[in-house]
Image: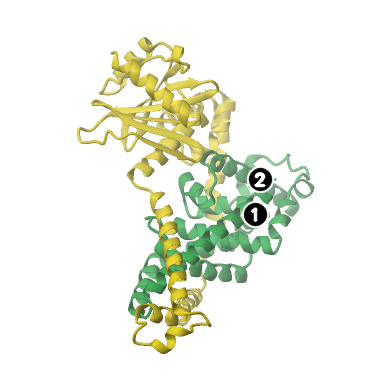
Amino acid sequence: MNCEESMKLMDAYLDGELDPITSQTIERHLRDCPNCDEVYETHGSLIRAIGNATPYYRAPAGLRERIQSSLREEVAERPRRTFTRDAQLLVPREQPERRTVLFGTPWNWMGLAAAVLLAAVVALNLVPRLQRPGADQFLATQLIANHVRSLMANHLTDVASSDQHTVKPWLDTKVDFAPPVVDLSSEGFPLVGGRLDYLDQRPVVALIYQRRKHFINLFVWPAESNASRAMNAISRQGYQLLHWADSDFNYWAVSDVNANDLQTFKQQFEGQTSHH
Amino acid sequence: MAFPLKAEHASETEDSESDQKTVKFVVVKKREEDLPREQLDITSFEAMMLPHLDAAHNLARWLLRNEEDAQDVVQEAYLRAFKAFRGFHGSNGRAWLLTIVRNTSYTLLKKNHTVDLTTTFDEEIHASGQESLTPAAILENSEDAKLMTDAMDELPAEFREILSLRHQEGLSYKEISDITHIPLGTVMSRLARARAKLKECLAAHIGKEK
């Protein structure tokens, strides 16, 4: 790592937001480079001073009460807005005199309107629920973060080689599983190298492939026996994620290539590994 | 040109929130007359959100730089949050609330055109040749709360916001990214720029005092 690179990553390093391996690289550089070390030292002190020297504006007395009473006012107003209308829907027979006219509208029209609104509610409620962070969504967030970090910190590979017979043995010595490594140059996805990474609090292997000017991180770790084999494609924040599994391994491919390219990549990868 | 974009985004977020308001309104209809349940709603909402009142107020205060506005915005944000509460299923209540506080703050800043004003910040005031100050000299003065606060108040809203979220709330890049709707990489670069600007402002202030 040179000084320029180390300066670029300074803030993320001091904030503890870099992956452990890049952090170690920086630490090594700082040991060798007194200039950078000094800059880090002063910048770190300044960063600490920001939190210490700026006032934290606690909520003044009275604001809590103000909020609590405004919430109660809000609730108290709700029945007034909705009571008559709903009473009509729920007990129309007992109150025929209200049935005919409500705000100048026959009640069954109100019923229809309510039904339409209800359908809209169901639809609107369903959308965020589908996007709700489940386990996969949480993993997806981590995957994207790792993918971004690998590009951001210029720490794409630990072992840079397009030769699968170099990458695989290197990886095999680093983790307690032996992931399949294949070069897909002839299919348009040249192997760039391999990297160790962490996901879900476990070490995983990241294989890096290139598609034109884009990179694909393929994260691999042993599959649990009961794990779902279902394929799963997610698109988030402009990144495509594709998950699949075979009897031995879990695969998550992350990239900014388009969804079709990623599908092709998966098919090629699977096609090549099944021969091994 | 980051600010016009920011303003547009704020209004977008506003739209999606008003959608949720509609949702709220109708769902509530089904449960009319059920005051105890409404009370229950308030109780669980307050139990989950009031502990973050200081954080909400602090963020609004830094964004608006004005105590009265900050209180109004926090109250309004809590009301909006309450109306959208049944749509909230996450576990990070603080981040969710801060997102709403932030959007509400930007709405007011936009209305008062303060967002535009803050973007005029820069060269004329701060290019006043403070390069002679060494980092060590800046650091020496960095414990001066007044200097530091004045310097931070001069920064554009997006810098005040990110510095406050990071240094006062101690949030991770990921949480900041969720609250401000900017990608992780942008969080990193914006934070670095904010700190660099803060240094410049500090230097300018130290220069003035001498």
For disc 2, the marked residue is B197
Where residue A197 sits in the image (x, y, percent)? Answer: 37, 29
Where residue B31 sits in the image (x, y, percent)? Answer: 36, 74
Q: Quadrant of residue A161?
A: top left
Q: Amino acid at mark 2?
A: Lys
Count the marks.
Answer: 2
Task: In this rendered view, identify the residue nearer to me: A271 or A65.
Answer: A271
Q: Amino acid at mark 1?
A: Ala
Chain B: drawing colour: green
Q: Do the dots labelled 2 and 1 sit on one chain?
A: yes
Residue visible at 51% across and 79% down in the picture: A105
Quarter holding the N terminus of chain B is top right
For disc 1, the marked residue is B7
The answer to whether the residues at label 2 and label 1 have Cβ atoms under 8 Å apart is: no
Residue visible at 73% across and 39% down in the picture: B132
Task: In this rendered view, identify the residue nearer to me: B44 or A154.
Answer: B44
Where residue A49 sits in the image (x, y, percent)? Answer: 55, 50
